[in-house]
Image (cartoon, rainbow, N blue to C red):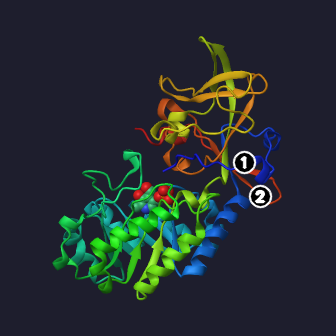
Amino acid sequence: MAKKVFIEPWIDKTGWKAGDFGDIQTPCYVVDKNRLEKNLKILAKVQKDTGCKILIALKGFAMFSVFGIIRKYLCGVAASSLNETRLGFEEFKKEVHVFSPAYTEKDFAGIMRYADHIVFNSFSQWKKYRRRVLHKKISCGIRVNPEHSEVKISFYDPCGSLSRLGVTMENFEPKNLKGIEGLHFHCLCENNADALGRTLKVFEKKFGEFLPQMKWVNFGGGHHITRKNYDIKLLCQIIKDFKKRYPHLQIYLEPGEAIALNAGVLVARVIDIFKNKMNIAILDVSAACHMPDVLEMPYWPQILGAGKRNQYPYVYRLGGPSCLAGDIIGDYSSPKPLTIGSKLIFFNMVIYTMVKNTTFNGMQLPSIALRDKMGKIKVIKKFGYKDFKNRLS
Ligand SMILES: Cc1ncc(COP(=O)(O)O)c(C=O)c1O
């Protein structure tokens, strides 16, 4: 999930300046097509060099208006619900894989219409549904939990103690593998390739004996492949070495963050400034509603031209317009004073944001805009009262 500590210097990389956003109405997410495509080219090269297939994990980024670009490079989607499965089927139109900790009867019937790969989280679920899927053209897999933790924050560690994600070795049922064609693990979060290497060793030690009877293995997400210091060479070597050991297996990766990492911003505005022992600025974006990982992770998101608390002379606590006391984005400093109406550009704000937004407090959802290769920004979606009201009754 989105900790976003590995921010690249946008201004140098993209030439974006606060002025580029002109009089864009805020709040607004702006996705940069160039940056998105740059990430996709990196992922496509990994596929080409190793023979693995990369899926986009829709839970991190599901902006279907750019699926046309993404599908040029990636092989399909990894969905986590009936809604995502249907979106992938209708809008992405390539492979549709789905994993959920548990499927309800009703959702499962829908999922069977749209998915070509279904991953089960337990043998109990597999045994419940296997008769229904076996005569369909659906390839089924089991998610395993290698019980190897690489993620330091327990909230994001799928292999932590008493995890509900994946079957542990102790609970694996070899006698119920008939019909299972793949094994899936997801153990990483914003990790480098070395973490995959260590995870794979444990995975193979525990579950390697079942691989000869499989057709595919899914290495999950959490591979921060498009990050600046990610060791792509090592990733490719790890995949190729695995492939040498199991040449019959198709390898899948399903990153979310890596797809649109640093490929978009959230443009916000200051709507009030006052003091309570320090300067407090209220913005038209909310940590709770529009950038929830700031509170969940938690992390301090970077702002174009601003710095940490004591870097510049003018210090502000930035908060959202909701009534939640903890709706605080963070403390920042600026080389010049902020004024009401000042525009602020939050970096790396299109992953795990649009997909997680809420209208808590009746909060306005940020519009969504695309920046094309010429630098022109076009708002492609606006939200209003109906979007808030439709979710209530
Ligand atoms: C099963 C599964 N696959 C893929 C992902 C995508 O992970 P990331 O966005 O960290 O690459 C997640 C994230 O939680 C996940 O749970």
- What's the residue at 65%, 39% (across, down)? 302
Residue 31 percent location from the top left of the image: 68, 53
Residue 147 percent location from the top left of the image: 30, 60
Asked whether mark 1 and ligand 1 are closer than 8 Å, the reply comes as no
- Residue situated in front as seen by the camera: 282 or 213: 213
* Tag 2–tag 1 contact (CB < 8 Å): no
Looking at the rendered structure, the kind of residue marked 2 is Asp
Q: Height in image: 315 above or below 350?
A: above
Q: Height in image: 216 above or below 223?
A: below
Residue 323 percent location from the top left of the image: 49, 23
Q: Residue 372: which disc? A: 2
Say which residue label 1 marks.
Answer: 9
- What's the residue at 46%, 74% (across, down)? 252
Q: Height in image: 270 above or below 267?
A: above
- Residue situated in front as seen by the camera: 330 or 339: 330
- Residue situated in front as seen by the camera: 382 or 156: 156
- What's the residue at 52%, 26% (across, down)? 322
Looking at the rendered structure, the kind of residue marked 1 is Pro
Callout in the foreground (2, 1): 1
Q: Does any portion of residue 325 appear in the rendered image?
A: yes
Asked whether mark 2 and ligand 1 are closer than 8 Å, the reply comes as no
Could you tell which of marks 2 and 1 lies nearer the N-terminus? 1
Q: Does any portion of residue 116 appear in the rendered image?
A: no
> Ligand 1 is located in which of the four quadrants?
bottom left
User: On the picture, is 42 further left or further right than 328?
Assistant: right
Quarter of the C terminus within the rendering:
top left
User: On the picture, is 157 further left or further right than 295?
Assistant: left
